[in-house]
């Protein structure tokens, strides 16, 4: 069992500085963004990812996986995958497949499955595992059961499931998240850790009150993290947990700066360690 943090909220710091920060927090490594607008741009991966791995190694940390924008097997994807393989990074998070208008989901699932098959074949050549993240809202997959339908015909060595208590609870608040984990058990390869609360929004023209999600500290949210972790333990997941300190911007309970994110990550990690 290893603990990492997602670097999205720390991209105004160099990777070396981020390694120092994470080492100081007692984390084991990084979930590094290698995507457009990320810590490393895809075009720079061959030059900059080795430097990132070196910076982590020097501080006793590990880059456990890459968060990418990869959705298809194209030359840009191959460059990222090949570089990761050369550096001993054996898995990566895929990008997202948007959900289009109602009435087309069945055909969209078929299309996404075909794209996943191509990515899986490319990644298998380099012995690197693509992992599909569950993201609530207008994405495929938005919940665990849909991810199961997408990947059930792939072996767990070909494609991994990236589970997430925030998104799985938002779409399956009572028991849907648990059933999703149950179905996905053989494929679970990564676990994000974050939490949310429902926030009152505006009333629509018919007077219906609309609600939105806000990222909140781990201990303050709707997702039952002790239960989520307990199920993962029962399913014998012993991989990486990535803390997502997404506390910048209007989707957060507070719009924190980088220093604020560091402090909140420390608090979140202290809470999360109690679950083990």
Image (spheres, rainbow, N blue to C red):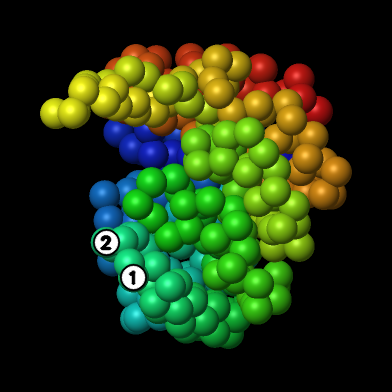
Q: Nearer the viewer, residue 31 or 252?
A: 252
| 206 lies left or right of 264 | left
For residue 218, above or below residue 111: above
Q: Nearer the viewer, residue 218 or 127?
A: 218
Check disc 2 and report the residue beneath it: 101
Q: Nearer the viewer, residue 229 or 63?
A: 229
Crowding at mark 1 (Cα within 10 Å: few <14, some 14-19, many 20+): few
Could you tell me residue 17's position as x and y percent? 43, 32
Looking at the rendered structure, the secondary structure element under dot 1 is: loop
For residue 108, above or below residue 209: below
Looking at the rendered structure, the secondary structure element under dot 2 is: loop
| 238 lies left or right of 205 | right
Which quadrant holds residue 11?
top left
For residue 226, above or below residue 256: below
Crowding at mark 2 (Cα within 10 Å: few <14, some 14-19, many 20+): few
Image quadrant containing the N terminus: top right
Check disc 1 and report the residue beneath it: 104
Q: Are marks 1 and 2 in contact (CB under 8 Å)?
A: yes
Could you tell me residue 196's position as x and y percent? 48, 26
Q: Residue furthest front?
A: 206
**Residue depicted at x 33% and y 67%:** 103
**Residue depicted at x 34% and y 28%:** 212
**CA distance for labels 1 and 2:** 7 Å
Could you tell me residue 222's position as x and y percent? 55, 23
| 144 lies left or right of 47 | right
**Residue depicted at x 52% and y 46%:** 31
Residue 111 visible in the displayed image: yes
């Amino acid at each position: 069992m290893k603990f990492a943090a997602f670097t999205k909220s720390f991209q105004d710091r160099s990777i070396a500085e981020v390694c120092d920060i994470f080492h100081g927090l007692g984390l084991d490594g990084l979930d590094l963004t290698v995507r457009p607008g990320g810590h490393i741009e895809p075009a720079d991966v061959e030059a900059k990812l080795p430097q990132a791995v070196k910076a982590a190694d020097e501080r006793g940390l590990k880059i456990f996986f890459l968060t990418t924008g990869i959705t298809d097997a194209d030359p840009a994807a191959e460059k990222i995958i090949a570089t990761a393989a050369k550096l001993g990074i054996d898995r990566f998070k895929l990008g997202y497949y948007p959900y289009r208008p109602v009435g087309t989901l069945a055909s969209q699932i078929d299309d996404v499955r075909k794209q996943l098959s191509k990515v899986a074949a490319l990644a298998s050549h380099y012995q690197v595992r693509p992992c599909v993240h569950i993201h609530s809202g207008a994405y495929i997959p938005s919940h665990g059961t849909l991810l199961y339908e997408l990947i059930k015909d792939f072996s767990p060595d070909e494609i991994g499931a990236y589970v997430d208590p925030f998104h799985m609870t938002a779409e399956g608040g009572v028991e849907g998240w648990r059933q999703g984990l149950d179905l996905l058990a053989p494929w679970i390869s990564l676990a994000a850790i974050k939490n949310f609360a429902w926030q009152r929004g505006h009333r629509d023209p018919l007077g219906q009150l609309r609600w939105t999600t806000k990222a909140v500290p781990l201990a303050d949210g709707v997702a039952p993290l002790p239960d989520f972790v307990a199920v993962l333990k029962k399913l014998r997941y012993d991989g990486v947990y990535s803390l997502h300190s997404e506390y910048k911007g209007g989707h957060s309970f507070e719009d924190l700066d980088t220093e604020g994110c560091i402090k909140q990550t420390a608090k979140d990690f202290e809470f999360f360690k109690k679950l083990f």
